[in-house]
Image (cartoon, helix red, strand yellow):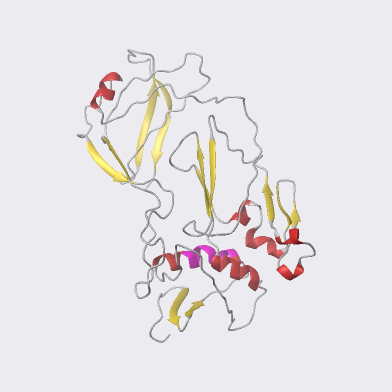
Amino acid sequence: MSSGWVGRGKVRAREVANGAEIAIDGVTTQARYYKPLVYEFFRKEFAIRPRWGEFEVELMMEYVGETPTLDLDNLAKALLDALKGHIFFDDSQTPQAQGTGTEEWGGGGDYWGGRNMTLPLAGHPVGVRRPEDAKVPEDKIHSAYRFLLADLMPFGKNARIQFEHGGTNLSTEHYETVTYWYGLPAASLVRTDQLKVGDLESERAHGYVSPNASEVYELTSRYELGPDTLERLWPNLPPVSGEGREVYPAHKDSGRYTTGVSEFNVKLDRNNLGVLLRRKLDYSLANQRAEVYIGPPDAKEGDWKAAGIWYLAG
């Protein structure tokens, strides 16, 4: 291709008068193929999309070659959409699950093929493909549902489900959700103790012993919640409101690391039906693995019982 094109893979683009020209190789009939492909290209190589404030997009599409069976309306949506979601359980700051597009959540890859469907566990019962197809105003409102039966998500205190609207959560479309759940009248998971490694007073109070542990060090980092800062994307144009704004602030904390044994005491409710032992970790230390054993106070050899393995690959 001629000069001015950015990208060497399946997606390339260049700026033209009043817009951009995008070339995509390897067209398939699966529009969902383009979501991660184009989203990552726009994010890493060709930062064309404003990340703050309202904006309009006009797409003109041309296919060169033998045309496959492809819904261009769905393809256009896939090019514009990069919706992701996060699911948090029991006050965790790290999401236990992450989704992709909202239509996949409703069981409809490629936007249900522009049609309506109703299945026992997922569906898209209302919403027309084009505004001109609407017989009543309500037809322009899309609705989807999903029942999590085979893929239950148990929690003991609370569940927080977030949908990210657009690549940087700045879409101005109107969304509403309704959630039904089955549970007890009160939380079944209650925190009974907390050890803060790196805090000398907390370590003493919990009998923390780790002979090979490092000295206390401080870490500044963020939880994996998405883009943390709205970067300046158009250096040659006047700034857009909100560029440079910090979305998710960094957190400071202290701790230790070790490749040996750590031992500590925590308080438990005698009437418990199970225990959740959660830790905060430093992702910069790769392939973390620890075998966890529990025992009574002043446990001796033979009193310890295996409880499980903490493991973080990568």
Q: Nearer the viewer, residue 174 or 166?
A: 174
Q: Quadrant of residue 65?
A: bottom right
**128 part of magenta stretch:** no
Q: Residue at x 56, y 65 (%)?
A: 33
How many callouts does the rendering have? 0
- Residue 297 image point, x, y percent: 35, 13
- Residue 52 image point, x, y percent: 45, 62
Q: Quadrant of residue 282?
A: top left
Q: Residue at x 45, y 64 (%)?
A: 40
- Residue 313 image point, x, y percent: 39, 45
Q: Main secondary structure of the magenta part?
A: helix
Q: Residue at x 41, y 67 (%)?
A: 240
Residue furthest left as drawn = 215
Q: Quadrant of the N terminus?
A: bottom left
Q: Which residues are magenta?
A: 32-39
Relative vertical location of residue 78 with respect to residue 209 in this rendering, above or below: below
Q: Nearer the viewer, residue 85 or 284?
A: 85
Q: Residue at x 63, y 82 (%)?
A: 66
Residue furthest right as drawn = 135
**33 part of magenta stretch:** yes
Relative vertical location of residue 107 with respect to residue 131 in this rendering, above or below: above
Q: Quadrant of residue 14?
A: bottom left
